Image (tube, grey):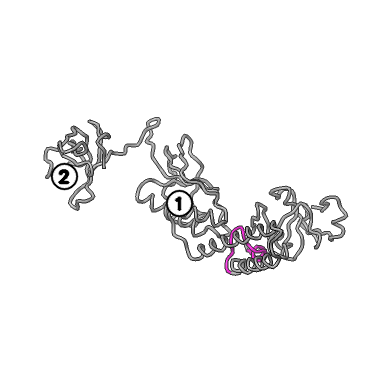
Amino acid sequence: MIRKEQVRIGMRIVGDDPESPESYPYKGTVTALCETGRNETDFYIVIKLDGESMRQPEISRCCPEGIMRCFPWTVSPEEKPEKRNNIPSTAYTAVETSRGFLFFTHTEEGRRSLREFLQEMVDSYFEPSFDLGPVCVYEAEGVLPDLSPVNPEKMPLAAYPYARRPEDFRLDARYRNRMRPTAEDFRSFCHNAGCTVSHRNGNIADTLEALKRYDRHLETLRHMPEAAPHEEDETRKTRQQLQRLPDSAYDIRGHRTAGRIPDDPAPEISVEGVSLSASRRGILKAGLGLYLSREIRAAPAHTYAWVDRNTERIVFGSRPPGDRETAGFKRDTGKRSSASPRSTKKKTGPQHKM
């Protein structure tokens, strides 16, 4: 539909009455705007049809002179791409991920391709291998280099043809999400992407939300002197029982049990930004503390790693655990070195041979 204030003599418009099964698409140039006199919004447009439209037999029969009267609800302005340096500039929806950009045109094909990509992200959201966050969705406009992939077909997330941001590209952010493994970020992304939620991911989100409520309640009880000890104990037991559901049924990104991580067949697994190879995970699986060399630490607090025996989680610290032997790797040979808890305590800092 076109508004009266949009109409200009000489402008290009396109038409195709969606309510008429006998209508045919056409294009033309506005030659006049005529009011009917009934009210200010009641008008029709006179256009001169272009040659391509006149080559349609149905159009040429009804408009032999190439002149057509159009009602405002049957036409719209022709979207003519702007030009920069004489090169057509096109509008896209762009999705930025940690791996790069994907571009989707504002066509039925582009919208379908975008829906499939976003749905694949939702379906894989809690998978341990998911690594596309943070994510930002833009309205984009510019010129893509030749042979740049647009509207990619559905494929595994890691196989999509992610690209760098093109030069001189205008990006207007429409939505951002850190894509953390939390119920809040997950539900926000599903809502804004317009995607469906599987029963599995719905159960995970509900469980994570409930665990967070119990954690808040426990924190409140710890700061309330008048709180009954049995209430805190009961709350903690209930939370532990609830934790068994995701630990036994799901392998959740950011919430993986220590038992699942060492057995993962992947060559490298990232935990809190620390890359754990199969050999390093073997040390943790053996119940030892792990000394992390400086080049793989994500922060000073990531000097040592071990499995917490109460929570079955891999935790990090700047000091070695005092209840077990600590091991690392010699830099030159790759052989494991170790130190007993007693000898470790006597040292002023990590003295492991790497």
Classify residue 57 as left or right of residue 108. left
Q: Would residue 253 be counted in the magenta stretch?
A: yes
Residue 88: x and y in percent read: 37, 36
Q: Give the range drawn in magenta.
A: 249-264
* Mark 1 vs 2, N-terminal side: 2
Local SS, label 1: helix
Q: Out of 231 and 330, give the one closest to the viewer.
A: 231
Classify residue 253 as left or right of residue 293. left
Q: Would residue 170 be counted in the magenta stretch?
A: no
Residue corresponding to mark 2: 59
Q: Which amino acid does label 1 sit on?
A: Asn
Residue 146: x and y in percent read: 43, 40
Residue 301: x and y in percent read: 73, 50
Task: Kindly report the distance in space between the C-alpha atoms of the residues bearing marks 1 and 2.
Answer: 42 Å
The chief SS type of the magenta part is: loop
* Image position of 34 with respect to 134: above or below: above
Q: Which amino acid does label 2 sit on?
A: Ile
Query: Callout 1: 10 Å neighbours few (<14), some, many (20+)?
Result: few
Tag 1 and tag 2, C-beta contact below 8 Å: no
- The residue located at (41%, 52%) in the rendering is 113
**Residue 192: assigned label:** 1
Of the 4 image quadrants, the one containing the N terminus is: top left
**Mark 1 or mark 2, whichever is nearer to me:** 1
Q: Out of 136 and 270, give the one closest to the viewer.
A: 136
Q: Out of 310 and 301, give the one closest to the viewer.
A: 310
Splitting the image into 4 quarters, where does residue 219 fall?
bottom right
